[in-house]
Structures are given as structure tokens and as C-alpha cells.
């Protein structure tokens, strides 16, 4: 039976994850191979060739502009991101939309985490403008998101929508996604959520990486420490890195508080800190900032 492009891509991702589990930090990929992967499905794919032993020329990790916190313990293992094939910047709008649709279909049928697949109501893929310069990344769906199949629709989502609108963007003109596409299961609990495990985030990360490569945002906003951990593969104390741009796949990442944290604390000073982070995002995007925007929560933070 002929092997489909999606099956080949899944096999390649699984192989990279196996390398990661064995502690491999570097992998050489020729430009011709990357070009072939980026060209998408082909009618008659060539037979697979033996994979050469990894070499140290091309680091398979991110290079943060400011160092992020190291892993909490040696038990967490090596911290490297599994890189999905890069998408050419010249990809047409129609081809880009088709690629995102195909990726969404793959995610909707994903069974890589059997417990999550069995307990979920919906896969929460992502929503928004795939041509947006701004991508917001959260950690995982909650009960409301699982029910509706859309990220950030609960109380925290309503607050995020207000933040986005105050920045001058309608919600549907940015893109919003999570590191984990399924709600973490909570056996024995009738309510509440739990943090995704590192293994769950590593398993699901290729979907987010493919979304990032398709959208090619100018800036990513990471909402909370878990989102940063999912992206960078290590524990990142959000209080230490928020407000400082990091670098992920050559894209600036602004770490900031998760909206749910603002709802729990209700502290105007914390709201001002998050807003200062968003002002930096607007400045980096070259967006105009009004005096009213600059002065939000200012008196309370002094």
C-alpha cells in the first residue's frame, strides 16, 4: 500500500522524538531534504533512504535571546525541541490555507495520547487569522474549551479577548493556540483542570510547530510558565522571564502572565505588568500606541 505524505511526516516526527528520548541534541539535514519536505505531498514519493548518523553541525534546539531557567532536575532529561519542516515564505495564500486545513484534520484524528483522546469532547486546534503577525500560545484547553472546541473561551479567554482588543486588534485578526490540543484528563474529578505533563506537551508540540511555520508570526506571546515550558522544553519561572523577549525559531517570544493568574490575583499592579509586556509587543510590531494605552493601570503600579 502506498505511503501517504501524512504517514511519512508522522513517521519522521516519531523518529525525531525517539532521537530526543535517547539524548540526541544535534541532527544534520541537507538543504535538498528540507526543500523536498517543504514542497508537501507528492504523487509518487521516493523510497526512504537510510538515515545518516546524527552529526553536530546543526543544533536541534532554540537559542533564546536571554537565557531561560534550566530544568528543575536532571530527571527531566535533555531540553531540545523537535523541529517540524519549515514552510517556505513564498507559499501562496491558498496553499497555506490548504496546508493548515490538512494539519487540522490530522490533529482532529490524533490518538497519540490514548487517555486524552478517550476523555476529550473536542480537539482544540486553534483559531484566528493564519496570516496574522501575532500569535498567542496558551498551555492546554479547559472544560469550556473542550466543550466548544475553541481555545480561550472561558473566563480567562474573555479576559484575553479584552486584552487583545485593548491592544487594537479584533480577536479574529490574531491567532490563538495551545501547546496541548486536548484537555488533560482529570480521572476521579468532576471539575477543575490539571497541568499537562512534559511528555504530553512533547508529544503534541509538532502540531504547534507546524502552525507556527505556516502562520510565520512576527511575534509570539507565551501566556504563562507552562506555555514557555512547552515551547522551550524546560521549566521556566514566568516571574523571572516575563517582560523579556526570548528567541524561538528566529521569532521573538514575549513571556507574560496567563490571564487566569490575573483573575486569581485581581492585583492592579500585576495587570500593569502584563500590560507593559503588551506595550513592548505593540512597539516591536510598529503599532501606534495612544497615551490612554500607555497609562492603563499606571497609577496602581507606582
Image (spheres, rainbow, N blue to C red):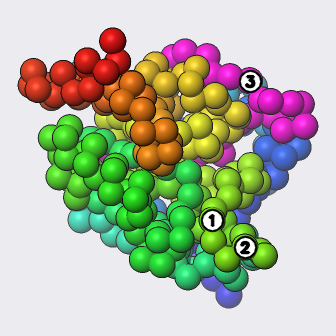
Horizontal arrangement in the rendering, residue 262 relative to residue 232 (left or right): left
User: Is 68 included in the stretch rendered in magenta?
Assistant: yes
Q: Which mark is residue 192?
A: 1
Q: Position of residue 161 (x, y in %)?
A: 28, 52
- The Cα atoms of the two marked residues, 3 and 1, are separated by 29 Å
Which mark is in front, 3 or 1?
1
Image quarter (top left, top right, bottom left or bottom right) of the N terminus: bottom right
Q: Position of residue 3 (x, y in %)?
A: 64, 77
User: Is 76 included in the stretch rendered in magenta?
Assistant: yes
Q: How many marks?
A: 3
Residue 230 in view, yes or no: yes
Residue that numbered label 3 is attached to: 70
**Magenta extent:** 65-90
- The Cα atoms of the two marked residues, 2 and 1, are separated by 7 Å
Front-most of residues 295 and 214: 295
The reply to whether dot 2 and dot 1 touch (C-beta < 8 Å) is yes
Q: Position of residue 79 (x, y in %)?
A: 74, 34
The reply to whether dot 3 and dot 1 touch (C-beta < 8 Å) is no
Report helix, strand or loop for mark 3.
loop
Residue 250 in view, yes or no: no
Residue at point 51% right, 17% down?
A: 65
Residue that numbered label 2 is attached to: 189
Front-most of residues 211 and 19: 211
Other residues around mark 1 within 10 Å, as few (<14) / some (14–19) / many (≥20): few
Amino acid at each position: 500500500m502506498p505511503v501517504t505524505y501524512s504517514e511519512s511526516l508522522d513517521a519522521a516526527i516519531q523518529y525525531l522524538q525517539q532521537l530526543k528520548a535517547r539524548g540526541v541534541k544535534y541532527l544534520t539535514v541537507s538543504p535538498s531534504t528540507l526543500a523536498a519536505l517543504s514542497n508537501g505531498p507528492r504523487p509518487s514519493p521516493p523510497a526512504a533512504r537510510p538515515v545518516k548518523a546524527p552529526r553536530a553541525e546543526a543544533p536541534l534546539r532554540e537559542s533564546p535571546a536571554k537565557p531561560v531557567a534550566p530544568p528543575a532536575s536532571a530527571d527531566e532529561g535533555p531540553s531540545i525541541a523537535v523541529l517540524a519542516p519549515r514552510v517556505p515564505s513564498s507559499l501562496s495564500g491558498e496553499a497555506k490555507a490548504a496546508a493548515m486545513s490538512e494539519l487540522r484534520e490530522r490533529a482532529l484524528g490524533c490518538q497519540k495520547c490514548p487517555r486524552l483522546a478517550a476523555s476529550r469532547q473536542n480537539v482544540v486546534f486553534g483559531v484566528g487569522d493564519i496570516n496574522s503577525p501575532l500569535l498567542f500560545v496558551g498551555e492546554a484547553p479547559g472544560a469550556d474549551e473542550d466543550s466548544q472546541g475553541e481555545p480561550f473561551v472561558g473566563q480567562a479567554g474573555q479576559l484575553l479577548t479584552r486584552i487583545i482588543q485593548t491592544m487594537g486588534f479584533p480577536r479574529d485578526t490574531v491567532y490563538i493556540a495551545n501547546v496541548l490540543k486536548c484537555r488533560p484528563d482529570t480521572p476521579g474529578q468532576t471539575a477543575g483542570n490539571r497541568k499537562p505533563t512534559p511528555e504530553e506537551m512533547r508529544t503534541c508540540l509538532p502540531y504547534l510547530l507546524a502552525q507556527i511555520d505556516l502562520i510565520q508570526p512576527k511575534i509570539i506571546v507565551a501566556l504563562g510558565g507552562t506555555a514557555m515550558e512547552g515551547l522551550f522544553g524546560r521549566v521556566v519561572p514566568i516571574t523571572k522571564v516575563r517582560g523579556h523577549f526570548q528567541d524561538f525559531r528566529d521569532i521573538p517570544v514575549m513571556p507574560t502572565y496567563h490571564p487566569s493568574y490575573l483573575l486569581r490575583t485581581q492585583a492592579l499592579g500585576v495587570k500593569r505588568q502584563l500590560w507593559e509586556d503588551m506595550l513592548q509587543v505593540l512597539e516591536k510590531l510598529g503599532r501606534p500606541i495612544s497615551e490612554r494605552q500607555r497609562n492603563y493601570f499606571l497609577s496602581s503600579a507606582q
